[in-house]
Image: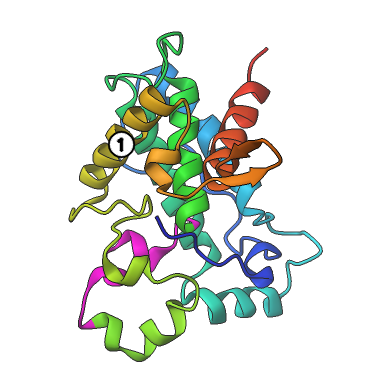
């Protein structure tokens, strides 16, 4: 799995369009699903660190800097993350959770969200498949954006960076979730998903990418428990 670059300019800008309503769009959910989607969206926005309007970095310069790096507006990113949050929440209405005691699939949903964030930061050129298009990869825009991440040379698909050829987000998400579940079932973490080598510290070892994704997810999920 490919970890994308996190550049400073991408985490200090405000949303020019203000809030993205959580109920906006054509989605229809049960109350529990919508509640989980809201938690996922709020968490992703905290991770992305894209402040709302009327913040210290609410100037035109901030928005221009963000667009120069990402080739898309901040509000577009927020809308995409909102949609992804809803789709993850909806998936776990019926998907088997990663743990037997995760009856509502909440922790599992946060893990899926965390993987997408740390793998690609929900970037548009990855989500819409441009990163896997051989023609686009030769373009000037690709030369600019692939400095942020190359999708493992075009072989890793979607914001989840699965090495599985899928064409739409829902298909990629289902495949990614299945692989996360398999890894957690057999290893207790995401090492089977990240495909990384262990880092040794004395007599112990750990898998940094797996730990990063799991720790972020479980900390966020726990923060919403009352």
Residue 177, quarter of picture: top left
In magenta segment, residue 208: no
Q: Is residue 40 left or right of residue 193?
A: right
Q: Secondary structure at mark 1?
A: helix
From the viewer's perspective, is residue 88 above or below residue 79?
Answer: above
Q: Residue at x 32, y 29 (%)?
A: 182
Q: Is residue 37 visible?
A: no
Q: Is residue 86 visible?
A: yes
Farthest residue in the right direction?
A: 56
Indicate the quadrant containing the C terminus: top left, top right, bottom left or bottom right. top right
Q: How many marks?
A: 1
Residue interval drawn in magenta: 121-135
179 and 30: which is toward the camera? 179
In magenta segment, residue 122: yes
From the viewer's perspective, is residue 217 above or below residue 35?
Answer: below
Q: Which residue is mark 1?
A: 179
From the viewer's perspective, is residue 60 above or below residue 216?
Answer: below
Q: Position of residue 18 (x, y in %)?
A: 61, 55
Q: Position of residue 204 (x, y in %)?
A: 65, 35
From the viewer's perspective, is residue 188 above or below residue 78?
Answer: above
30 and 213: which is toward the camera? 213
Q: Residue at x 55, y 67 (%)?
A: 5
Q: Position of residue 95 (x, y in %)?
A: 28, 22
Q: Position of residue 184 (x, y in %)?
A: 41, 27
Q: Is residue 96 left or right of residue 73?
A: left
Q: Residue at x 71, y 64 (%)?
A: 12
Q: Residue at x 55, y 78 (%)?
A: 69
Indicate the quadrant containing the N terminus: top left, top right, bottom left or bottom right. bottom left
Q: Is residue 180 left or right of residue 69?
A: left
């Amino acid at each position: 799995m490919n970890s994308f670059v996190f550049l400073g300019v991408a985490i200090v800008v405000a949303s020019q369009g203000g809030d993205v309503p959580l109920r906006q769009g054509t989605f229809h959910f049960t109350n529990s699903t919508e509640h989980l989607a809201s938690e996922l969206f709020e968490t992703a926005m905290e991770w992305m660190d894209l402040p709302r309007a009327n913040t210290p970095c609410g100037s035109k310069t901030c928005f221009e800097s963000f667009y120069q790096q990402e080739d898309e507006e901040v509000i577009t990113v927020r809308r995409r993350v909102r949609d992804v949050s809803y789709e993850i929440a909806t998936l776990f209405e019926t998907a088997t959770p990663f743990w037997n005691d995760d009856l509502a699939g909440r922790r599992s949903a946060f893990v899926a969200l965390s993987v997408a964030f740390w793998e690609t930061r929900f970037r548009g050129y990855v989500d819409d498949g441009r990163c896997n298009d051989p023609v686009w990869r030769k373009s000037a825009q690709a030369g600019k954006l692939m400095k942020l991440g190359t999708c493992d040379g075009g072989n890793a698909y979607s914001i989840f960076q699965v090495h599985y050829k899928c064409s739409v987000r829902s298909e990629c998400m289902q495949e990614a979730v299945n692989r996360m579940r398999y890894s957690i079932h057999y290893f207790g973490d995401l090492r089977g998903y990240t495909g990384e080598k262990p880092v040794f510290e004395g007599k112990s070892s750990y898998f940094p990418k797996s730990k990063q994704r799991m720790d972020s997810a479980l900390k966020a999920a726990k923060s919403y428990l009352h």
